[in-house]
Image (tube, helix red, strand yellow):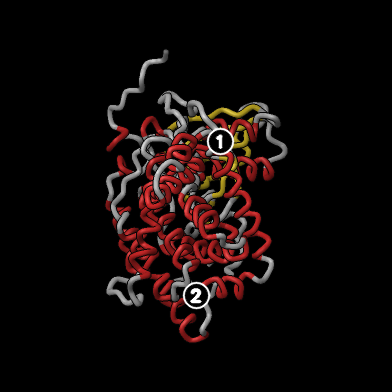
Amino acid sequence: MKSIRELYRIGTGPSSSHTMGPRRAAAEFLRRTTDAASYRVTLYGSLAATGRGHLTDRAIEETISPTANVSILWQPHITLPLHPNGMLFEALDTMGNVIKEWRVYSVGGGALAEDPADGPLTIDIEKDSDVYPLSTLTEILEWCRRSGKSYWEYVEECEGPEIWPFLNEIWQTMRAAVERGIDREGVLPGPLGLRRRAASYFVRATGFKQNLQSRGLVFAYALAVAEENASGGIIVTAPTCGSCGVVPAVLYHLQQSRQFSDSRICRALATAGLIGNIVKHNASVSGAEVGCQGEVGVACAMAAAAANQLFGGSPAQIEYAAEMGLEHHLGMTCDPVCGLVQIPCIERNAYAAARALDSNLYSSFTDGDHRVSFDRVVQVMKQTGHDLPSIYRETAEGGLALDYTPPPNN
């Protein structure tokens, strides 16, 4: 299993699979083809269906255009065999002849996968070696029981002490996104005319009594980061751009209300990253492949595990909190209205953050013993995602996205 550095990526929204991944692919192909006169990029499946709303074309053009001309072709009704987010990059000579081509997939969370003609899908073009010998939570939980250590200590053992400066940078970026988001007002870009709500939620929450104030602040923090993502701001994939508000909202709220140190927050981020990594390794965090359960559902599991650790949960209780966070998002579709990461994505971040805290609380009342393991839920999530019709997997052709008419411009 790869490093959690591949899960937590700092970048700009609105989509890790539709913006960050294609941007990385364009930069990589440009590096490989310095002698091309121009370029042609064909987008397939989900990338083509919602690419304009997700700014896929802009990400590719901004990367390649300073060097050479680039044309983009859209094939929303053609899906390449290995993943719904397929791309074909072609380098052309001065006569328009193809001198090099590269077929690559954006598989979620900003990661890329190649499609070699004579072998299986190769996840992540950097081909970093695995750093985790164990790749299921059941195995890692048993390691914790034998060693007496917790999940974050397993992360440190596998990643080395240098993981902590990295996670501190991740945390500072998350925190900055929350604080920027709750201070900004106005309308998000795109045809929906959707107003930012984080600032008003934050102000209103401070007027409630403690029990309602707490939940309102969590909503505000999640909305803040999700709105930053929707406007192309700097965020952290956790595990994706579309679900980037859940983990920061929970951790920011707990630090503000409980005065947890940055060191303890980083240890919680290590555990959260381990949870997300297990799903990414054994299933998928791509909305185009498994629906929103792989994005918001996984983010909820990550945040629930992090919160439970902060409150002193045992490894078994942490596993249970993560299991509930994912289990109760099973079957969630990915149906972005107008192909934008706004409706229902932004609200889902807020609800998932609240559900993560509920999962933590529920688990804390138990001894961690339960019948359905986290790993089993991951397997079910993967199969459920594959069983979903393609119109419910980030194509904006079904569900809430079907027949939606944007409001007229004023």
Q: Quadrant of the C terminus?
A: top left
Residue 173 location (% of width, % of height): 62, 49
Residue at image position (42%, 47%) is 213
Give whichever of 122, 10 is nearer the camera.
10
Where's residue 104, x and y in %? Answer: 52, 47
Question: Is 366 positioned to the left or the right of 86 in the image?
Answer: left
SS class, disc 2: loop
- Check the image and name the residue furthest to the top: 410
Q: Amino acid at mark 1?
A: Asp
Badge 1 element: loop
Q: From the top left corner, tell me how far across and down residue 187 is, in percent.
A: 48, 26
Q: Residues within 10 Å of mark 2 (few under 14, many from 20)?
A: some
Side of 312 where 33 appears, left or right: right
Q: Nearer the viewer, mark 2 or mark 1?
A: 1
Say the numbered circle drawn on residue 183: 1
N-term-proximal mark, 2 vs 1: 2
Distance between the Cα atoms at labels 2 and 1? Answer: 42 Å
As displayed, is residue 92 above or below residue 387?
Answer: above
| Amino acid at the residue labelled 2 | Leu
Q: Can residue 77 be seen from the camera position used here? A: no
Q: Furthest-bottom residue in view?
A: 146
Measuring from the top left, give residue 101's x and y in whole percent. 58, 42
Quadrant of res 357: bottom left
Q: Which residue is mark 2?
A: 134
Q: Which mark is residue 262?
A: none
State whether residue 45 appears in this view.
yes
Callout 2–callout 1 Cβ contact below 8 Å: no
